[in-house]
Amino acid sequence: MKFPGKRKNKHYFPVTEKGRESADPHFLQTEPFYLVGIDQLLVDIECAVEQEFLIRHQLKKGQSQILDDQAAETIYRELKMSGKILGEYAGGSVGNTLHNYSVLSEERSVALGAITRNITVGDYAFKYIRNTSAKVDLSYLQPSENPMGRAMCFVTPDGERTFGISKGCMNDLAPEFIPAEVIEKASALLISAYLLRDEKDPIFSSAIKACETALKAKVPVVMTLGTSFLIASKRDFFREFIKKYVTCAAMNDLEALALTGLGDPLLAAENILELADLVLVTVGASGLYLAGYVDEQFARRTTYKLHTKSIVDYNLYEFSRPMRKSDCAKPLKIYTHINPFLGGPMIIKNTNGAGDGALAAILHDLGARKYHQAKVPNSPKNLVNSLSYSSLSQISKYANRVSFEVLAQNSPRLMRALPEKEDSLQEAYWDA
């Protein structure tokens, strides 16, 4: 496990300190450290179009919509002939996050989903596999007779993204292909709201089965909301679902508004804490917010300047490590906010994948917590039953840094790990 972020040496695990034990290599070899995610396997097709193109093909600007296979093929051929396609990549919100997690942590992740049975060189399934980290385990995928799903991202001159999705086999995952023994030993289970779009799809039942398994095994369930239109159309359903199953909910400000009815991201995060234990809200050029819980006796006051927005001194306990509310005798709500790293990249062609990158950083920190518990069982950190390895403040720094890297490279999937050495302007210092 590569530990999250750039840290001073003192924050690693010095085995010579009194009260600590050296790692047992035989124990570590048998202890699993991996993330599991259920995804609608897709190939992302990014293209540049004009407003007229969206109108002609009846595409709602800024929204995600389903296209039948014939309409998708017609659009694809037109884009191909006119040279409007900017790139074709392995996609899917969960798929992007699994890939980025494995790149950041250098650890295995497991993808659950359906893929076309017959794969040939150059087809969509081949492109998906080619552009996915070798550390993402695809051996549990369900083979399907249907073609690979496609997600077309139409970028207009104003930078707005509109999505058209051709289903293919993306919803074919059946409950019998959910390996309970794999989920029970995972550091977290990652799902998206897209899986729950239609109760008639097999993948809906599979997601419910996986969440039930994770709930019984006390494995954190992490959910990304995907699109505000979907959340608004099933708001009550998603609020109940999050309250029952989800440990960490991740979204952008528009999805937070759809879920809570609150336009203020900080107040929206506070509202969602009544449903989940940890909340990530990304707000584009305004950075990101994190909200969680800590037991009063373990609360750590920030040494940074206190800030007041819609909540007075909201960052007072941002140096605390987040916990499940059920593990707190006297739960306190904790918050932090961070502006874009270095103000954001100089040039941003589109924001596709920035939120997935931030979530991958959080998942890496959750995995590092489990790894640390096994590596140094006598560590003082293990006296607190926290969700994460790092404080809320430091998780936000790491998530912010990964988002910057995704935006800078103009790809939702990291092509490399973060630089080991950075100049003094970029360097972030991480607490224990």
Image (cartoon, rainbow, N blue to C red):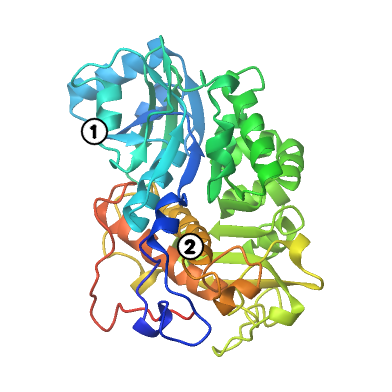
Give me the residue at 39% from left, 10% from top. 70
Residue 341: horizontal and vertical position, in percent?
Answer: 38, 71
Give me the residue at 50% from left, 27% from top. 65
Residue 18: horizontal and vertical position, in percent?
Answer: 50, 87
Mark 1: amino acid: Arg
Give me the residue at 53% from left, 51% from top. 187
Is 260 left or right of 22, judged from the image as shown? Answer: right
Residue picked out by circle 2: 365
* Depicted 126 relative to depicted 260: above or below: above
Characterize the local packing of mark 1: few (<14), some (14-19) or many (20 or more) Cα atoms within 10 angstroms.
some
| Quadrant in the rendering for residue 333 | bottom right
Is 84 left or right of 141, judged from the image as shown? Answer: left
Give me the residue at 54% from left, 43% from top. 190
Residue picked out by circle 1: 130
Comparing 428 with 198, the one in front is: 428
Q: Nearer the viewer, mark 2 or mark 1?
A: 2
